[in-house]
Image (cartoon, rainbow, N blue to C red):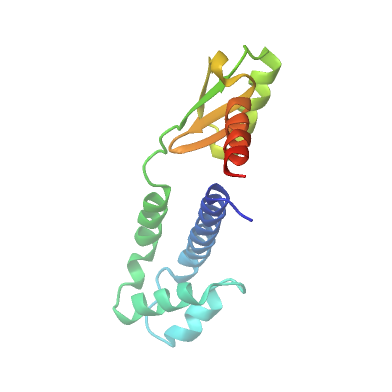
Amino acid sequence: MATTVDAKAIASTLYESLIGATLEQLQATAPKLSGFAGGDVAQRVDAALPANALPQVRNFLLSLANEGLLDQLGEVVTAFGNFTAGPPAQALAAVVTSAVALSANQQATISADLRTRYGAETKVSFTIDASLIGGLVIRVGDQVLDNSLRTRLSAVQRNMLTS
């Protein structure tokens, strides 16, 4: 079963893939349509598009042509590229809490895993809380992974009390 984190990561990948494909197709097509005047618009657009072009890209180009704006395609593609880049992503803060001090190797492994999952700019800090008894509590943004022995023991105690 996918977690919320997995669903968000997958959705983000899908979004970036679709936007990236659209931008690539527009960038490949724009030079082929520059200076286009008159003639069969649909035929010219179809000839300029890559074979795997999204239908939405074709429809967009035809709409520009019908509005007489095809001569501005280069500027539109540049603006779209800037728009899709968006503002720089803010680095997430990750706090890893353990019952004992982690070795440098353990810290490096955990940091690498978190940066792979949440982005290279993720800032990872490590703290110690002896009350955890063992295991880790990892907080990234509004997400918490509590794999501490304290939490596991509490769950066992709750199960015993309800039985």
Measured from the top left, where is residue 110 in percent x and y? 64, 26
Q: Position of residue 49 (x, y in %)?
A: 54, 73
Image x and y of residue 131, in percent: 55, 17
In the displayed structure image, the side of residue 115 where residue 71 appears, left or right: left
Q: Residue at x 60, y 16 (%)?
A: 99
Side of 102 where 90 appears, left or right? left
- Residue 74 quadrant: bottom left
Image point 62% across, 11% down: which residue? 101
Q: Quadrant of the N terminus?
A: bottom right
Residue 121 in view, yes or no: no
How many numbered marks appear? 0
Q: Position of residue 93 (x, y in %)?
A: 46, 28
Q: Identify which residue, 15 or 152, lies in the foreground.
A: 152
Q: Say if 89 sits above or below 102 in the image.
A: below
Above or below residue 93? Residue 1 is below
Residue drawn at (33%, 82%), measured in percent from left and top? 66
Which quadrant holds the C terminus? top right
The residue at the point 29 percent across, 77 percent down is 68
Image position of 76 with respect to 161: above or below:
below
Q: Nearer the viewer, residue 75 or 118?
A: 118
Along the viewing direction, whichever of 133 and 31 lies nearer the viewer: 133
Figure check: 42 above or below 71: below
Residue 158 visible somewhere in the drawing: yes
Residue extending farthest to the bottom is 40
Q: Residue furthest right?
A: 105
Q: Is residue 100 left or right of residue 43?
A: right
